[in-house]
Image: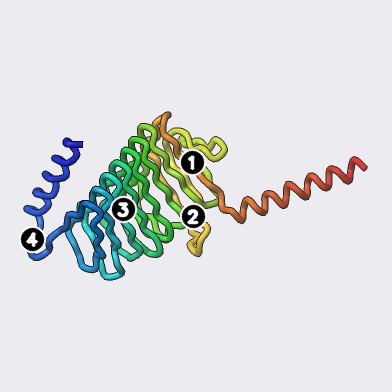
Amino acid sequence: MKGMCLAVCLTVLLLSATYALDQPGFVLTGYEHKNAIYTYPFGVLWDYSTVDVSQSGKIGEVYLSDYSALAARKINAVDTLYAYDQSRASITHGGSIANIFTSDNSCFTLKHGYINTIVSARGSSSVHLEDLDSMVALTVEATDYAKVTVYGWDFAAKDGLVLDGTRVRGTGTLTGKWYGYNNDRFEMPITVNDPTATIRVVPEPSSLAVLSVSLCGLLLRARFRRK
């Protein structure tokens, strides 16, 4: 823990020296809460602190640790997120992020949002990607015991990747469709996928319902044929 505190303090000093004084970042601790309504070069949160990024707000780099939390729902809300310990972060309804780095037991959720560049999940962290509005040049890395879950439909694997039921094994490219209004087929390169990590796909609920109805129909047909 002392090592983490030292790392965070050094990060704050480095970021403060990097950015202009008229654009200060912020540090929250001890259950503090902030409504981020301006543009901040960085934000550091720990010890149960929380931040809500408003529609007019934006944060360059965010560092979450302990049990801190971030919530955002605005385009260009966060550039890069680093999540540690038991921290939580969610970006929804048009929120945007470029890079996600999770570790320890942290959790990140992106739903109805925009993402590009990289998702890197480590430790025992978890990442949930659902119904994205846009995904540009995204690569996924899952190491250690991390979990990455992709919600969508019409999934397929190529370039050496293997779909084993809902489990994604190996590396390659995962393709599929989001089940929102964006019906464009996406391609998601998976460059790191440790055997101990878990990357899985979750089919659209309506697709499961259709499948269930179809199975019920087949079972009834088989039953009537026996009679």
Local packing at callout 4 (Cα closer than 10 Å; few below 14, some 14-19, many 20+) is few
Local packing at callout 1 (Cα closer than 10 Å; few below 14, some 14-19, many 20+) is some
Which residue lies at the image location 30% right of the left edge and 69% below the top edge?
A: 55
Q: CA distance from mark 1 to mark 2?
A: 18 Å
Who comes first in sequence, dot 1 or dot 2? 2
Amino acid beneath label 3: Ala
Q: Mark 2 highlights which residue?
A: 185
Local packing at callout 3 (Cα closer than 10 Å; few below 14, some 14-19, many 20+) is many
Is 29 on the left or on the right of 132, as rendered? left
Q: Secondary structure at mark 4?
A: loop
Amino acid beneath label 2: Arg
Who comes first in sequence, dot 2 or dot 4? 4
Q: Secondary structure at mark 1?
A: strand
Q: CA distance from mark 2 to mark 4?
A: 41 Å
Local packing at callout 2 (Cα closer than 10 Å; few below 14, some 14-19, many 20+) is few
Q: Tell me residue 192's x, y (percent).
A: 36, 36
Q: Is the N terminus in the top left, top right, bottom left or bottom right quadrant?
A: top left
Which residue lies at the image location 39% right of the left edge and 60% below the top edge?
A: 92
Q: CA distance from mark 3 to mark 4?
A: 26 Å
Q: Nearer the viewer, mark 3 or mark 2?
A: 3
Q: Mark 1 highlights which residue?
A: 200
Residue 69, which numbered label? 3
Q: CA distance from mark 3 to mark 2?
A: 32 Å
Amino acid beneath label 4: Ala
Q: How many marks?
A: 4
| Quarter holding residue 124 | top left
Q: Mark 4 highlights which residue?
A: 20
Q: Secondary structure at mark 2?
A: strand
Taking the view exactly as shown, the residue that stands out farthest to the top is 195
Q: Nearer the viewer, mark 1 or mark 2?
A: 1
- Colour scheme of the picture: rainbow
